[in-house]
Image (spheres, rainbow, N blue to C red):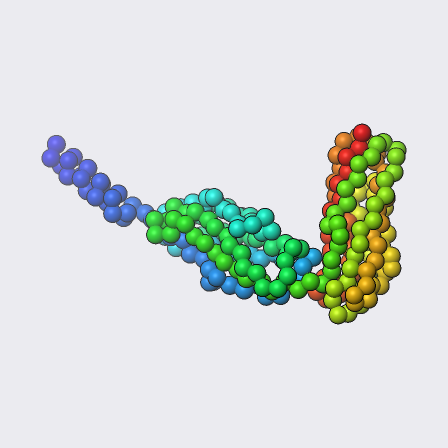
Amino acid sequence: MIRSIIIFCIFIFIASTGVLGQPKFQLVGPERFDIGTVPNFVPHKHSLTIKNTGTDTLILSDLSASCGCTATLLSTDHIPPADSGILTFTFDAKRFDGKVEKKISINTNDASRKHVEIFFTANVVRIIEIQPEYFFFRTSIDSPATQTLKVENLSTETISITSVIPTGKEISVELSPKEIKPGESGDLTAKFTPIIAGTTNGNIEIKTTHPGAPLLTVRYFCWSK
């Protein structure tokens, strides 16, 4: 009986002091960093490595960003001891200009780091302005709808368009002119011919010769009755 009580007390002591195992959060690299110059219309993707240097499984939860301009994704929310996971974030700089700072927050089961905040800064350079930012069509079956967006060159060099390719067969797109000089603009015109009723969406990929904006993506949405 006494032996059982002693063993039980030892077990309680070990559990209360954390000897049984503790997760340990470690971000590879600084928790405040700069991602450099980011074009305003080209989303910037960045990956961070999170290591578990403890002796128990590290559990990550409540991942969030300070604004909707930053999308976050975890490769896993359970990281075994001596293992690692990848935190990927994509910063969409469309609405920004100049120096900005954003925050990513995450909770952990590491007793010493229950809440972690990661900060990144960026210098947003405005190269292209597209107004409106996307196409929205409201039409009916076999009734084509046409809309035009304005594409303005805000940079200091001529932008040549090498291709304009939509993801859907129901939409055709043309950009005129194919070369847009600094301070000038072109028209991105799309014709949508719905095939079925309901909602449809997709992307229009625009490839350019500008080193800061080699690939632009414009979204389109349609509601057909």
Left or right for 139, reference 201 = right
Comparing 53 with 4, the one in front is 53
- Residue 40, horizontal then vertical, whole percent: 67, 59
Depth check, front residue: 151 or 63 = 151
- At which x and y percent is residue 11? 22, 41
Q: Residue furthest left?
A: 2
Write the residue at 25% across / 47% down.
Answer: 17
Q: Position of residue 177 (x, y in %)?
A: 87, 59
Residue 171 visible, this angle: yes
Q: Is residue 52 visible?
A: no
Q: Give the number of marks.
A: 0
Q: Residue at x 41, y 53 (%)?
A: 25
Q: Quadrant of residue 34?
A: bottom right
Q: Residue at x 78, y 59 (%)?
A: 152
Q: Residue at x 12, y 32 (%)?
A: 1
Task: Name the spot of residue 117 as percent of width and height, x first.
Answer: 45, 54
- The answer to whether 147 is drawn above or below residue 216 in the figure is above
**Could you say which quadrant of the image residue 124 lies in?**
bottom right
Quadrant of the image occupied by residue 123: bottom right
Q: Is residue 217 left or right of residue 3?
A: right
**Looking at the rendering, in which quadrant would you find the C terminus?**
top right
Q: Residue lying furthest bottom in this view?
A: 156
The one of 20 and 131 positioned closer to us in this rendering: 131
Viewer-closest of 139 and 111 = 139
